[in-house]
Amino acid sequence: MVHNLLPRNPEQMLISRCLQNDRLAQREMYEMLSARMFAVCVRYIGDREEAKDVLHDGFITLFSRLESFKGEGSFEGWARRIFVNTALMHLRKSDILKHSEDLESSAADMKEGPSVMDRMEAAELLKLIARMPAGFRTVFNLYAIEGYSHQEIAHVLNISEGGSRSQLSRARIWLKERLRNYQ
Amino acid sequence: MDDKELDKLFREKLGSYSEPSEDIWPLIEASLEKSAVVPLRRAKFRRTIMTIAAAAAVAAIGFILWVPDGSRSGSLSVEEHALAENPVLSVPSSGERTEENIGIADTGTEKTGYAGSVKKTENPATEKTSGSVTKKDASVERLSDQASESTVSEDKKETITATGSDNARPDKPTEGLSDKKENNLPERTEEKSAGKQNYERYFLGDGYFAENSGSKKGKYLLAVSSNLASGMDKAVQGTSIMNMLSSGNLPDFTSGKVPSVERISDVKYSMPLNVGVQVQLKIDSHLAIGLGIRYSFLQSKYDGLINKKFNRVKQSLHYIGIPVNLYAIILDRKNFMVYANAGGSLEKGLRAEYSFQSYDGSTHASSSISGVSYSVNAGLGVEYRFVPLLGVYLQPDIVYYFNSKIPASIRTDQPFQAGAEIGFRFHF
């Protein structure tokens, strides 16, 4: 991982201390990541209480796999993937992904302009996503925010690519519908 | 807003968004403490194993380096006394034979350097001839000096140092028997050293040496192996022939004394057996160091004449050693691993045992093995792990033995050896 002779930045030093089971260093890493990772958990899980459980499991997984971080790429990006996977595992256990909400309204383009969306704070958008059905929410998070392809989503969620596209389309419709009502 | 704009908006707003939450660090810390118990137990277990291994290695090193050599003091066994009193070579009682001996000495290889170690038998019956023998000894010694200096001196050195005796021996072969009789223990020590050395020099070991090695994937690895080295069935052609002259006295088998032997066949070596255990400590993901204890057994046979009677002679050598190796993983896959290793070994001889079988009976003799031997080795290995905690490995390697104070064997005749070992590795 960080076995090199070059001078190490503060992040690398923190990681090294965490690898030595330094509780203070681990607490420091928790403080550094918890807020952003909790947002990720809420985005996927929806329920805040359940998101706390996922946050807890995510940090346990992160500390146990810290040795596998090779130093390539952003550490936060690496940590984010761990929390995303932890959230997905939680969803699989709950079989939430197997249930999808039928859309009451037909697909329609949102007529409201970008100004509506601009007015919405991130916290409100987060709440909106949290209310989305689990299947829609998961695919939308993976595609629109994490940047996964439909092929990758299909592999991760063990669904077909067509199913991934369908879920994404429905998620967008659902969001547009709710945003229309936001006015 | 189209779909792309929608995605982009959520991505920009929520991609790096932070949502404060209730502090759950105490729960995380408790879980970490709980999960640390198991690794702690494993760490303690590993420390215990390493401590035991280190203590065993220190004890073995101490034994190898400081165990007293039985030939240095009056701690000879009955068998060793027999050897001392009846050295391999007898001094010729006639001038002609002396010349023969000289001739042999002149042709000397390291094996024939025995001429420098000609000794008089401590036999009262030969006392009469001792005077002439003394003279001849002097001439033998002078002529020996004229022979290849390197051969003779080397042989003399070997003779002197083989058993670690500090007593000068062949320098004064002209000492009378009476002197020898008066100088009991030191003389015996000298003669025994030469006699033993001469015995030992005719036993050449061939073959392969079992090594223990361990290769590991886990942090700690316990390796148990035996050497099935590739065949090195070599019958070494001995070039020195011990000239035995009948003194008119028959060997006394009943007293356990070992008579002198005239070898009449090539020496053949049995497959060496090495068994041991090694513990390996992982330095990082690609390097590990191994420390172990190894027992080695070497055996050889040849035919010889004892007082003109045919005997089958067998030598068995027992060694204990400490191998230390560095391992570098070249390829690491799920079930198999390829690695390279290099290191060395320190070995101490425990015991040398001899048996002499003839048509009407057998006799036995034994002695300690003085000195410490060193070797270096390098090789490549492959391990297949058929269950998570247990794997089998094959490791061809090459070994070079330094000719330190060890009995003559294939290790001294052919210090550069090639072989292979197989064994099991336990991962924990």
Image (cartoon, rainbow, N blue to C red):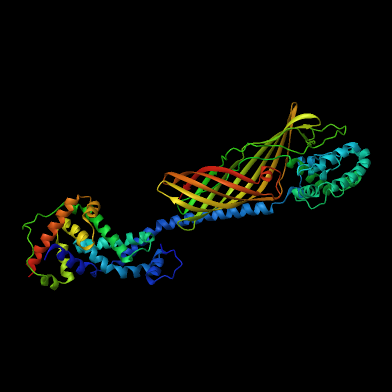
Q: Residue A108 or B258: which is nearer the viewer?
A: A108
Residue B281 in the image: x percent, y percent? Answer: 50, 55
Q: Is residue B3 left or right of residue B168?
A: left
Residue B155 in the image: x percent, y percent? Answer: 78, 47
Residue B55 in the image: x percent, y percent? Answer: 58, 55
Residue B324 appearing in the image? no
In the image, residue B315 above or below residue B293: above
What residue is drawn where x is 79% and y is 53%?
A: B166
- The mark total stands at 0
Residue B255 in the image: x percent, y percent? Answer: 80, 35
State which quadrant residue A59 falls in: bottom left
Q: Quadrant of the N terminus of chain A?
A: bottom left
In the image, residue B291 above or below residue B386: below
Residue B280 appearing in the image? yes
Q: Quadrant of the C terminus of chain A?
A: bottom left
Q: Is residue B371 left or right of residue B307?
A: left
Q: Is residue A169 left or right of residue B166?
A: left
Q: Residue B42 or B5: which is nearer the viewer?
A: B5
Q: Is residue B49 left or right of residue B403?
A: left
